[in-house]
């Protein structure tokens, strides 16, 4: 299993509701699992949509 690091992010009430909805389905065991699955989906999307932008970002973005 990969090492994990804890970070803190701010989300909108709508995203919080989305996470709660996903948890209510029983498919995910924690908010962290929902966020990890979402980030993996974003990774796949960006890899196919922007194939040249696979490396680390050159600038930081406030998440």
Image: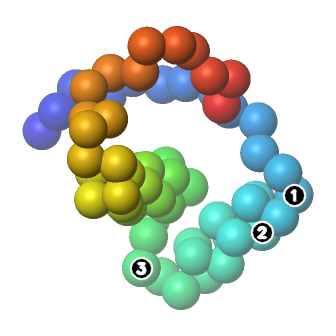
Q: Nearer the viewer, mark 3 or mark 2?
A: 2
Label 3, label 2: how far apart the Cα atoms are: 16 Å
From this viewpoint, which residue is outermost toward the top?
Answer: 59
Relative vertical location of residue 32 with respect to residue 10 in this rendering, above or below? below
Evaluate if marks 1 and 2 touch, with contact meaning CB atoms under 8 Å apart. Answer: yes
Q: Nearer the viewer, residue 38 or 28?
A: 38
Relative vertical location of residue 58 with respect to residue 49 in this rendering, above or below? above
Q: In x, y percent, where is residue 41?
A: 37, 61
Q: In x, y percent, where is residue 53?
A: 32, 35
Which residue is at 70% across, 70% downward?
18
Whether residue 25 sits left or right of residue 29 in the image: it is right
Which residue is at 74% across, 60% downward?
15
Q: Earlier in the sequence, mark 1 or mark 3?
A: 1
Q: Nearer the viewer, residue 54 or 3?
A: 54
Label 1, label 3: how far apart the Cα atoms are: 21 Å
Q: In x, y percent, where is residue 31?
A: 56, 55
Label 1, label 2: how far apart the Cα atoms are: 6 Å
Tell me if mark 3 has few (under 14), some (14-19) or many (20+) residues whose alpha carbon lies within 10 angstroms of its own: few
Relative vertical location of residue 6 with respect to residue 33 in this rendering, above or below? above
Q: Which residue is mark 3?
A: 27
Report whether residue 26 is seen.
yes
Which residue is at 62% across, 22% downward?
61
Mark 3, secondary structure of its residue? loop
Q: Nearer the viewer, mark 1 or mark 3?
A: 1
Mark 2, secondary structure of its residue? helix
Q: Which residue is mark 1?
A: 13
Which residue is at 52% across, 13% downward?
59
From this viewpoint, which residue is outermost toward the bottom?
Answer: 25
Q: Which residue is mark 2?
A: 17
């Amino acid at each position: 299993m990969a090492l994990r690091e804890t970070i803190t992010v701010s989300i909108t009430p709508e995203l919080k509701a989305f996470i709660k909805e996903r948890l209510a389905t029983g498919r995910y065991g924690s908010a962290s699992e929902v966020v990890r699955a979402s980030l993996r989906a974003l990774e796949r999307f960006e890899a196919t949509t922007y194939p040249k932008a696979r490396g680390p970002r050159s600038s930081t973005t406030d998440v």
